[in-house]
Image (spheres, grey):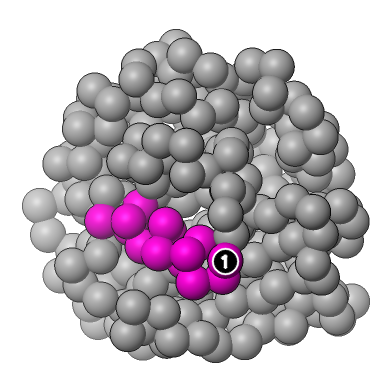
Amino acid sequence: MAKNQQITPRFRTIDGLNIRYAESAPRDADALLLSPWPESVYAFDQMWPQLSADTHLVAIDLPGFGMSQRRDKMMSPHAMGEFVVRVADEFGLEQPHVVGPDVGTGTALFAAADHPGRIRSLVVGSGASSVPITLEGPLRDWVLSDSIDEYRDVDGREIVSQALDTIEGYDLPGEIREDYLTSYEGDRFVESMSYARAYPEDLPVLRDRLPQLVTPVEIIAGRDDRAVPPSNAEFLHDRLPHSKLDVIDAAHFTWEEAPSTYADLVTTWWGGGFSRV
């Protein structure tokens, strides 16, 4: 299976950074898709045809993720939220939906909280949200360990390969897997950890903002997620005034493991579900 030919990554300079993106044909509605970690814009490969049928898509690798250039001061959910709004401005997206699985969860929520009315709706999930922090496995260590020096001598390809091996029920096409590995080779993965290591500082701030968030939010979580337990999704749902929670039969990589279910939930949400929450 080759890469979906509708996804053609390009690069664009945004706020002085070389950012990789993919874009679909114009439609009446817009959506901005934020790549999960440790993947890239190709994380949306299986869902791209369905999501782009009625919606103009712009998928990006956030700074420091995928193949986009990093800026150290942006490597936190709160700072990255500001960049997402800058991206929407750059592409002329007046009031886009935003899909931010995994690391995109905190970023998308901060963007909506700091800019009321700028974003039409959010789809988030599979990302650290709860306070105190509730994570498991290697991800917990990456976030909470006193030091990550032990990872600095490990090629990022090796760490990412181990993470990708936990994807259940789906064999990544070779070209896409290689794209993910190349995106984080050398020290790029360990440098991307700085975003997740900002969770202890940023998540309490986000928690206090959630009850005032006016943007409708769809939360999608994997029932068998062994990295980010579904309790993170429940934490959000309990505090967001306009939210919907769907826990689906998948592990952590919900968008890869249950793409049809995920895409159905997103398109139903875009089709009017967000306005009824």
Residue 206 can be seen in this image:
yes
Quadrant of the rendering where the C terminus is positioned: top right
Q: Hey, which quadrant is residue 247 in on the image?
A: top right
Q: Hey, which quadrant is residue 208 in on the image?
A: top left
Image location of residue 201, percent across then percent down: 15, 41
Position of residue 54 relative to residue 18, above or below, is: above
Read off the residue under disc 1: 92
Boundaries of the magenta span: 79-92
Position of residue 138 relative to residue 154, above or below, is: above
Identity, as a three-letter code, of the amino acid under mark 1: Gly
Image location of residue 271, percent across then percent down: 81, 34
Position of residue 115 relative to residue 215, above or below, is: below
Left of 184 or right of it: where is 41? right
In terms of depth relative to the viewer, which is nearer, 151 or 16?
16
Left of 201 or right of it: where is 46? right
Q: Residue at x 81, y 59 (%)?
A: 27
Image location of residue 139, percent across then percent down: 37, 49
Secondary structure predominantly adopted by residues drawn in magenta: helix
Left of 189 or right of it: where is 93? right
Quadrant of the rendering where the N terminus is positioned: bottom right
